[in-house]
Amino acid sequence: DPNGIVQRAVKAVKQQVPELMVITDVCIDEYTSHGHCGIVRDGKILNDETLDCLTTMARTHAEAGADMVAPSDMMDGRVAAIR
């Protein structure tokens, strides 16, 4: 969500202190009821669907003004997908 809490916070901080280096965490576990790093369906973690979600999250963080995104999830291929 380009208007999510992290994105809004990054925009607000960068407006007030533009020289501050902002690094954001890219992971979905904090937004799930199960706490896993990936999207779970029928008891299976869906790697490719999760990568799509993570790349969107990283992109919206960068568009909001984050200077660096730091993927902390445990999904295979996350760094290559985000790059």
Image (spheres, helix red, strand yellow):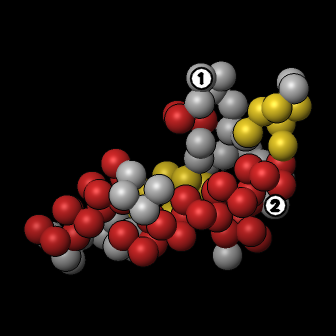
Identify the residue at horizontal 39%, vertical 52% (top origin): 4
Name the image quarter holding residue 79: bottom right
Q: Residue furthest left?
A: 16
Q: Residue at x 47, y 56 (%)?
A: 1
Q: Amino acid at mark 2?
A: Gly
Q: Which residue is mark 2?
A: 77
Q: Position of residue 8 (x, y in %)?
A: 29, 57
Which residue is pictured at 43% across the width and 62% down the height? 2
Tell me the amino acid under the disc marked 1: Ser
Q: Is residue 68 visible?
A: no
6 displayed left or right of 36: left
Q: Nearer the viewer, residue 2 or 82?
A: 2
Q: Is residue 24 left or right of residue 44?
A: left
Quarter of the image where one finds residue 52: bottom right
**Taking 41 as reference, is 80 above or below it?**
below
Would residue 17 be seen by someone viewing this image from the given angle? yes
Q: Is residue 63 left or right of residue 80?
A: left
For image coordinates 59% across by 42% down, the residue present is: 28
Q: Residues within 10 Å of mark 1 (few under 14, many from 20)?
A: few
Residue 48 as seen in the image, left or right of residue 21: right
Identify the residue under disc 1.
33
Q: Nearer the viewer, mark 1 or mark 2?
A: 1
User: What secondary structure is found at the residue carrying circle 2?
Assistant: loop
Q: Nearer the N terminus, badge 1 or badge 2? A: 1
Quadrant where the image shows the C terminus:
bottom right
Q: Position of residue 46 (x, y in %)?
A: 84, 43
Q: Could you tell me how far apart the alpha carbons at marks 1 and 2 are, in whole angstroms?
A: 23 Å
Q: Position of residue 54 (x, y in %)?
A: 64, 56
What number is the disc on residue 64?
A: none
- Residues packed near mark 2 inside 10 Å, few (<14), some (14 to 19) or many (20 plus): few
